[in-house]
Amino acid sequence: MSDAPLVSIILATYNEQENILDMLDSIFEHVRQPVEVIVVDDDSPDGTWKIVQDLADPRVTVIRRQNVRGLASAINRGIIESRGDVIGWMDADMSMNPAYLRDMIPLLEEHDVVIGSRYVEGGADIRPRFRVVTSFLVNRFAHLLLGKGIHDYDSGFIVMRRSVLDSVTLLPYGYGAYFIELIYHCKRKGLSVHEFPYHFVDRVKGTSKSAPSIFSFLVTGLEYGFRIIVTRVRRFD
């Protein structure tokens, strides 16, 4: 498949030493064309960046960011460093199975963007009930204000043609709400966004960064709500 386009998969990591090697192995197993993985690590105290660095695998680039934190900015840095005609990203904790990439990437022959979706037929959110309900409410709020036919606005699991970046911009700040803005912008620009069903499972190893406490989870939820409202009134064109 030497004539197949290069795929760049971006993993934003923080304290993922228990998952990162399994994640890399699974990506290389399931992506059937040339692939590079860009690990953008926010100086993990557990040495995630060093584990990747010590692999010395030419298919993997590790970027250790010091004195900088943030999911959206990490993904943006990965996009800047990527070389692929196809770009994607997903959680690095094995909650999003890289096996889905095998079916998602070929769909880019017909669509500009493919996102993993929990809320289309065949998809599911298999996590603790509090997290499931909260994510569902965020998506309902986004659907109410933004519409545009998207079911899973805050998926965070995506592959897209690089050419998409000629039309839309990822706003590199905050945690997960950036994804809502990105997908809404894609739809506003008339790009084809396809939702592929997947099962979102709870991490088996390590601790979630998005919900270490009820308080921080509520703060994150408020950020989502605020940015959904801002997205609705912002002019993208």
Image (tube, rainbow, N blue to C red):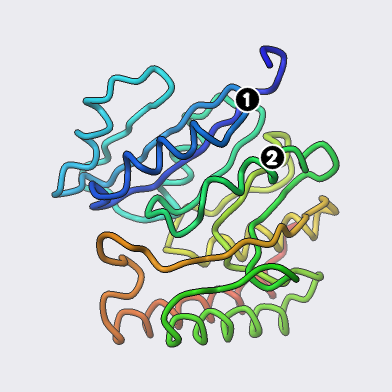
The residue under the point 24% across, 37% down is 49
**Label 1: how many Cα within 10 Å (few below 14, some 14–19, many 20+):** some
Q: CA distance from mark 1 to mark 2?
A: 10 Å
- What residue appears at the point 44 percent right and 54 percent down from the top-left corner? 91
Mark drawn on residue 153: none
In the image, residue 175 sits, relative to residue 66, either above or below, namely below
Q: Nearer the viewer, residue 215 or 7?
A: 7
Residue 105, labelled with which disc?
A: 2
**Marked residue nearer the N-terminal end (1 or 2):** 1
Three-letter amino acid code at the position of disc 1: Gln
Residue located beneath label 1 in the image: 33
Residue drawn where x is 41% and y is 35% of the image: 25
Q: Quadrant of the C terminus?
A: bottom right
Which percent across, then down, holds residue 119?
Answer: 68, 73
Q: Depth check: give the residue in front, 98 or 218.
A: 98
Q: Position of residue 45 (x, y in %)?
A: 14, 49
Where in the figure is residue 111, as x and y percent of width and height? 81, 45
Q: Amino acid at mark 2?
A: Ile
CB under 8 Å between discs 1 and 2? yes
- Is residue 152 toward the left or the right of residue 187 in the image? left
Q: Is residue 174 left or right of residue 20?
A: right
User: To which quarter of the image does residue 155 belong?
Assistant: bottom right
